[in-house]
Image (tube, rainbow, N blue to C red):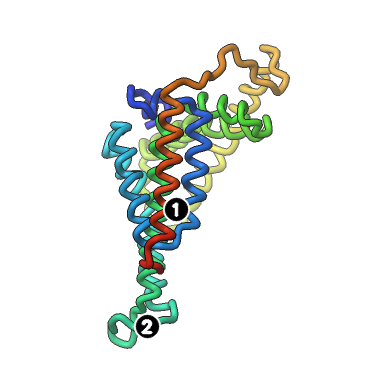
């Protein structure tokens, strides 16, 4: 599902100024990274879940994205609890699971999920063009904004090309397996995809040059801060202060 489809909605997050949302997403992500107490991390995760609930984004899409994030975290849970020095909680044969390792993995899990949820709630509620427009207003270098926009725009085009090439191979009797023929076939598919992506890039570039493109996106409309933006910004700042207060007032450290 594209960002444009996810961005459709009437919640305060959907209607807010993308510039504010980018700043808030960056602020919350940095703050969560530096939190050290479990109480503050749990509060951040609960608030992130609440924000996702407010957006009304489809659960299957959210769960799919969170699944891919947590696949890597599962690997950490298989290594860190027994490889981190500390007080042993229990033994699994010759392997000792330490309290410090479990707490460290718990913190990583909470931080990663909270950051991903905050960014999904704030950024997935805007179209990719609105985000690129907002980055330009925030004085991000133009070349980086264009690279971000075109990468996202044509990533889906390349995915469609890959599906077409793979489907054509399947129709010709190709059946993937663990053999040299399969590896050669996938190498040919990737090579064909690379050539087609290069040709598509050249056609897009010359089409834009023919329309007068000189490296600058000319924007006819601009963002304006409204009352809902101030409400959102105030709410997120209050959240940030609450997280810091919980961080400083609790002794439930890692």
- Report the number of numbered marks: 2
* Residue at 41% over, 24% down: 228
Left or right of 113 on screen, residue 212: right
Q: Determine whether the residue tagged by mark 2 lies in a helix, strand or loop.
A: loop
Which quarter of the rendered picture does the C terminus lie within? Answer: bottom left
Residue located farthest toward the bottom when viewing the structure as drawn:
94
Is the residue 76 above or below the residue 147 in the image? below
Left or right of 23 on screen, residue 41: left
* Residue at 43% over, 78% down: 83
Q: Determine whether the residue tagged by mark 1 lies in a helix, strand or loop.
A: helix
* Residue at 52% over, 18% down: 224
* Residue 68 visible in rendering: no
| Rendered location of residue 143, percent (x, y) | 68, 32
* Mark 1 surroundings: few (<14), some (14-19) or many (≥20) residues within 10 A: some
| Rendered location of residue 133, percent (x, y) | 57, 24
Front of the two marks 1 and 2: 1
Q: Nearer the viewer, residue 73 or 237?
A: 237
Is the residue 76 above or below the residue 240 in the image? below
Q: Which residue is mark 1?
A: 244
In the drawing, what numbered circle is on residue 108? none
Which quarter of the rendered picture does the N terminus lie within? Answer: top left
Is the residue 125 above or below the residue 183 in the image? above
Q: Nearer the viewer, residue 162 or 84?
A: 84
* Mark 2 surroundings: few (<14), some (14-19) or many (≥20) residues within 10 A: few
- Please say if the residues under marks 1 and 2 sit with CB atoms less than 8 Å apart: no
Q: Nearer the viewer, residue 171 or 140?
A: 140
| Rendered location of residue 147, percent (x, y) | 62, 33
* Residue at 47% over, 45% down: 28
Q: Nearer the viewer, residue 165 or 56?
A: 56
* Residue 116 visible in rendering: yes
Q: Which residue is mark 2?
A: 87
Q: Quadrant of residue 118?
A: top left
């Amino acid at each position: 599902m594209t960002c444009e489809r996810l961005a459709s909605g009437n919640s305060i997050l959907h209607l807010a100024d993308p510039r504010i949302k980018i700043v808030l997403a960056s602020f919350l992500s940095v703050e969560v990274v530096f939190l050290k107490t479990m109480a503050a991390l749990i509060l951040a995760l609960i608030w992130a879940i609440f924000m996702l609930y407010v957006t009304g984004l489809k659960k299957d899409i959210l769960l799919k994205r969170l699944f891919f994030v947590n696949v890597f975290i599962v690997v950490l849970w298989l290594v860190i609890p027994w490889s981190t020095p500390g007080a042993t909680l229990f033994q699994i044969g010759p392997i000792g699971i330490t309290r410090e390792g479990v707490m460290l993995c718990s913190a990583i899990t909470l931080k990663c999920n909270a950051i991903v949820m905050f960014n999904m709630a704030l950024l997935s509620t805007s179209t990719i063009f609105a985000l690129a427009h907002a980055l330009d207003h925030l004085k991000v270098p133009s070349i980086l904004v264009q690279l971000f926009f075109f990468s996202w725009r044509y990533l889906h085009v390349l995915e469609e090309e890959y599906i077409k090439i793979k489907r054509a191979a399947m129709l010709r009797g190709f059946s993937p397996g663990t053999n040299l023929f399969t590896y050669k076939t996938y190498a040919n598919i990737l090579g064909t995809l690379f050539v087609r992506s290069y040709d598509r890039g050249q056609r897009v570039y010359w089409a834009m040059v023919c329309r007068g493109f000189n490296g600058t996106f000319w924007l006819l409309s601009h963002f304006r801060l409204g009352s809902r933006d101030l409400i959102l910004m105030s709410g997120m700042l209050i959240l940030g202060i609450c997280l810091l207060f919980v961080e400083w007032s609790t002794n439930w450290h890692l």
